Amino acid sequence: MKSHVNGFTRRCDGLTLLELLITLAIGGITLSLAIPAMGALTGNNARSSSINTMISHIQLGRSEAITRARRTILCPSLDGQTCNDSIIWDQGYILVEDSNNNKTVDSDDTLLRVFQGLSDRITVHSTILRKRILFNPLGMSPGYNLTLSFCDQQQVVEPKAVIVSNTGRPRLSQTKSDGSPIDCP
């Protein structure tokens, strides 16, 4: 592009240094505002995905217990075959039909579903005294409420809990079943 100033022809091919610096400053400000929001969006998506996956497995466990008229067990598992004696669920879990009704996973029990690992960003821990979910043939999970806490390791998003009641139904909560804040390790 050419411009005429005072009878001289001058060629304008690019940006001036000032224009470039202003453009970079505006871009930097925009990015500084967008990056934290993107972290929160990513954290919310990871937490929501983990919660939805867990709730679908809880509902499947309850449904299978009713359909098969047998007890089912949902428990944390590292190997996809046996239950861990652990409150950590984010490394994987299994759903098993308790064929002999002994409330434990044995080699002759039918493995219904294996889920290996949730998002690396989200940790999931259950109530200390309740390390698995048992569903009876009526779809109930007798005992006391089980609370599964979903925590963001980067602490960008607030923790949430899935509470499984004695009726076997899960519900989403901002607190533990007793109303206290959710503990994140």
Image (cartoon, rainbow, N blue to C red):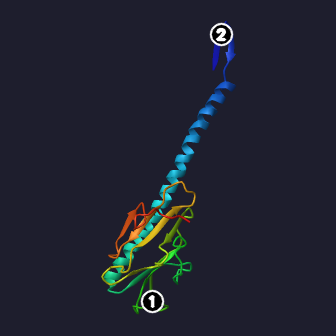
Q: Quadrant of residue 121?
A: bottom right
Q: What x and y, as percent, mark residue 119?
A: 54, 64
Please name whichever residue, 26 or 123, is drawn nearer the observer in this view of the structure: 123
Q: Amino acid at mark 1?
A: Asp
Please name whichever residue, 50 or 132, is drawn nearer the observer in this view of the structure: 132
- Can you say which quadrant of the picture contains the C terminus? bottom right
Q: Residues within 10 Å of mark 1 (few under 14, many from 20)?
A: some
On the picture, is 70 further left or further right than 84?
left
The mark that comes first in sequence, 1 or 2, is 2
- Can you say which quadrant of the picture contains the N terminus? top right
Q: Quadrant of residue 14?
A: top right
Q: Quadrant of residue 175?
A: bottom left
Please name whichever residue, 26 or 159, is drawn nearer the observer in this view of the structure: 159
Q: Nearer the viewer, mark 1 or mark 2?
A: 1
Q: Amino acid at mark 2?
A: Val
Q: What residue occupies the far top of the structure in this picture?
A: 6
Question: Is 69 located above or below residue 40 in the figure?
Answer: below
On the picture, is 36 further left or further right than 141?
right
Residue at 57% over, 61% down: 153
Disc 1, disc 2: CB below 8 Å? Answer: no
C-alpha span from label 1 to label 2: 89 Å
Question: Is 184 located above or below residue 12 in the figure?
Answer: below
Which disc, if any, is residue 5? Answer: 2
Query: In what element is the residue under mark 1?
Result: loop
* Number of marks present in the image shown: 2
Question: Residue tagged by mark 1?
Answer: 109
